[in-house]
Image (spheres, rainbow, N blue to C red):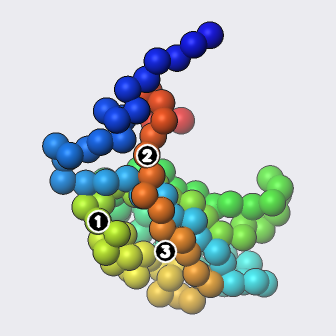
């Protein structure tokens, strides 16, 4: 099966005032209890930012393991706006995050993102 995609059209949002970013979060080692303490406030914060956070969730090494970080897909005008958003997250303000990586993200398939 062959796919012919116009990748330039998929990744070019010149007509928009936003860009997609992928953010990979790293939690501090051994911070599972702190994560549990901050979780409700974090989830309420995520819900309040649903217009910007297009996808968000924890990352773990196996289904039942304590999360080691998280992953977001963020719709924002620039990287500075993503940094400003991260700075207000209860997981950040509460001291859970050891760090994060922010990447510009381009979809490689034309289908809408949905789960």
Q: Tell me which residue sits at (36%, 41%) in the image.
A: 11
Which residue has dot 3 on it? 41
Which residue has dot 2 on it? 106
Q: Earlier in the sequence, mark 2 or mark 1?
A: 1
Mark 3 to mark 2 CA distance (whole Å): 30 Å
Q: Earlier in the sequence, mark 3 or mark 2?
A: 3
Q: Earlier in the sequence, mark 3 or mark 1?
A: 3
| 95 left or right, relative to 76 | right
**Label 3–label 1 contact, CB within 8 A:** no
| 63 left or right, relative to 112 | right
Q: Secondary structure at mark 2?
A: loop
Q: Tell me which residue sits at (30%, 60%) in the image.
A: 76
Mark 2 to mark 1 CA distance (whole Å): 14 Å
Numbered badge on residue 13: none
Asked if residue 44 shows in the view, the reply is no
Q: Quadrant of residue 68?
A: bottom right
Residue 15 lies, in percent from the top left, at 16, 43
User: In the displayed structure, would residue 71 be above or below residue 16?
Assistant: below
User: In the displayed structure, would residue 81 be above or below residue 106?
Assistant: below
Residue 112 lies, in percent from the top left, at 41, 31
Mark 3 to mark 1 CA distance (whole Å): 26 Å
Q: Tell me which residue sits at (55%, 75%) in the image.
A: 100
Numbered badge on residue 78: 1
Which tag is nearer the camera, tag 3 or tag 2?
2
Q: Quadrant of residue 21?
A: bottom left
User: In the displayed structure, would residue 69 be above or below residue 15?
Assistant: below
Quarter of the image with the N terminus in it: top right
Q: Secondary structure at mark 3?
A: helix
Residue 50 lies, in percent from the top left, at 36, 55
Asked if residue 77 shows in the view, the reply is yes
Q: Secondary structure at mark 1?
A: loop
Q: Tell me which residue sits at (75%, 61%) in the image.
A: 60
């Amino acid at each position: 099966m062959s796919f012919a995609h116009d990748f330039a059209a998929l990744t070019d949002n010149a007509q928009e005032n936003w860009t997609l970013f992928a953010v990979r979060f790293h939690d501090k080692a051994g911070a599972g209890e702190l994560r549990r303490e901050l979780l409700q406030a974090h989830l309420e914060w995520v819900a309040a930012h649903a217009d910007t956070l297009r996808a968000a969730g924890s990352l773990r090494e196996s289904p039942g393991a304590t999360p080691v970080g998280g992953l977001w897909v963020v719709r924002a005008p620039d990287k500075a706006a993503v940094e400003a958003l991260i700075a207000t997250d209860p997981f950040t303000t509460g001291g859970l995050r050891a760090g994060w990586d922010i990447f510009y993200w381009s979809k490689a398939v034309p289908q809408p993102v949905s789960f």
